[in-house]
Image (spheres, rainbow, N blue to C red):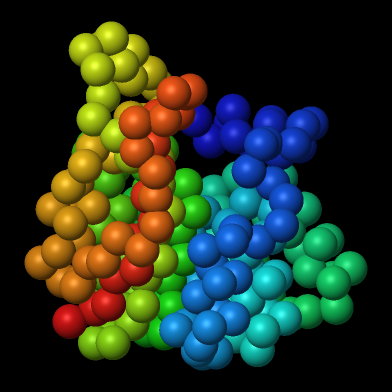
Amino acid sequence: MKIGYDMWYRFGTPPWVGAARSELVELVGSGVLAPGRAIDLGCGVGDNAIFLARQGFEVTGVDFAPAAIARARTQAREAGVEVDFVIDDLTQLSRVSGPFDLLVDYGAFDDLSMRQRAAYVRAVLPLTRPGSRFLLWCFEWQPRLWERIVTAALPFGAMMLRPGEARGRFGEAFEVERVAGEADLPSWPRGWAAYLMIRR
């Protein structure tokens, strides 16, 4: 999986590359997410991390793809902001340390296998403190039989969360609120959700 993503970032442009995500922009603009120490988990080329830095956050961006981190560093330099971009594995973080006031994940967690998701939660919890905010964006829907078969055979993860999975995996440590999303879309992917979680 790592090699595939690295090649994609090196020679192409994944579809999620672009402006900072709208839910993040809205929550920061409304003051719900106030400047502090932030980490972007699975930062890609740094769009969200750079946005946060421009809003006064002290930002760390983490991705396991070296090509993504190289592009992110270039973008931050061109934007005139400082972001600490780090190559690391979200399931066994070794190069970052908390606590962070804000954690952001746009589409990394849902791309992991079930075993990797459990490891991710164990790795991320030490980055938090009581009151830490965690904005998690994911594809989310109840998979049909053929989707379960296909995703089980994929080498890179399950691709979506099932309804209730975010609360099940994070609810013991966080208050979990679904702040945006769509379900039963006519096209594929068939749904998505954004969760704003607060560490207990």
Query: Quadrant location of residue 112?
Result: top left
Count of marks placed on residues: 0
Residue 116 relative to residue 53: left or right: left
Residue 91 vs residue 142: left or right? Answer: right
Q: Residue at x 13, y 53 (%)?
A: 168
Query: Is 113 on the left or on the right of 81, as rendered?
Result: left
Viewer-side residue, 69 vs 24: 24
Tell me the residue at 30%/60% (across/down): 178
Residue 136, by quadrant, is bottom left
Viewer-side residue, 34 vs 125:
34
Q: Is residue 60 visible?
A: no
Q: Is residue 1 above or below residue 126?
A: above
Q: Is residue 53 visible?
A: yes
Give the image quarter of residue 151: top left
Q: Nearer the viewer, residue 175 or 157?
A: 175
Residue 89 in the image: state x and y as whole percent: 45, 52
Which residue of the protein is positioned furthest toward the right in this rendering? 78
152 or 188, nearer to the observer: 188
Residue 100 image point, x, y percent: 42, 82
**In which quadrant will I find the C terminus?**
bottom left
Residue pictured at 68% horizontal, 72% vertical: 51
- Residue 199 locus on image (x, y percent): 24, 78
Residue 56 position in % (x across, y down)? 65, 89
Residue located at (21% from left, 42% from top): 163
Residue 37's place in the image compared with 14, above or below, is below
The answer to whether 144 is drawn above or below residue 75 in the figure is above
